Amino acid sequence: MNKTTSYRTARFILAFVLLSAGTLLAQNAPSQAATPGDTISPTRSIPSGLAPNMQVKLVEDTPGEKVYAVIFHAGDEALSGLTDFANRYHIADAHFTGIGAVSGATLGWLDLAHKQYHAIPVTEQCEVASMIGDIALYNGKPVVHAHVVLARHDGTTVGGHVWELHVNPTIEVFVTANTVPLKKKPDDASGMKFIDPTQ
């Protein structure tokens, strides 16, 4: 085996190892709810620090708003990352859209009668066909509210309220932050927190 062949072989092995490591990180990301039939409280806390590979770039800055590109990579959990982003950049009013792919997710469907979400676990690689959401303040802290539609390998979809999105290989989110803060208030009938435009 000559030097050129050895070099190419070593590069191939290194690329394979790095790709495998990224996939393992994404598949083994921490999960709080993952089985059908589980319920999730609307007040469940969002853990911080689960998106160590998140990158942020300010792409537009005007007197009325700022636009950020928030980019996630394999192994990141996107809801944790968006919450960390909102805290770090002092986001008090924003909306966002995103696309990408995940190795798994925990979504939810709101059961109004019981004021609980029913967990919708997703345990396969999916495309993020649509991701939308907003950010507003509750008790002085930013709260991220997101919904997503995920497309499976056969084109069928599953959607719901986002509790976890395990990124693989990326999710690209564009956040438009406004200068006028929005605040949420509790809604006793649903157990939810709604944006209150009168505040």
Image (cartoon, rainbow, N blue to C red):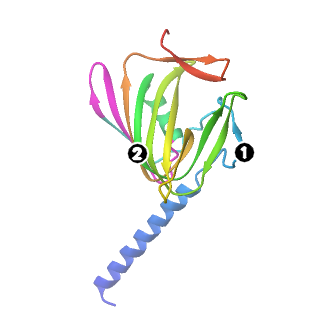
Say what amino acid the circle numbered 2 marks: Ile
Q: Which mark is residue 99?
A: 2
> Which sits earlier in the primary sequence, circle 1 or circle 2?
1
The segment highlighted magenta reads: 59-78
Q: Position of residue 82 (x, y in %)?
A: 48, 36
What secondary structure is found at the residue carrying circle 1?
A: loop
Magenta span main SS:
strand
Pick out the residue farthest to the top. Answer: 198
- Quadrant placement of the N terminus: bottom left
Taking 73 as reference, is 29 left or right?
A: right
Q: Position of residue 78 (x, y in %)?
A: 50, 43
Q: Position of residue 39 (x, y in %)?
A: 71, 39
Q: Relative to the observer, which residue lies in front, 160 or 1?
A: 160
Provide the residue designation for mark 1.
37
Q: Residue at x 50, y 41 (%)?
A: 148
What secondary structure is found at the residue carrying circle 2?
A: strand
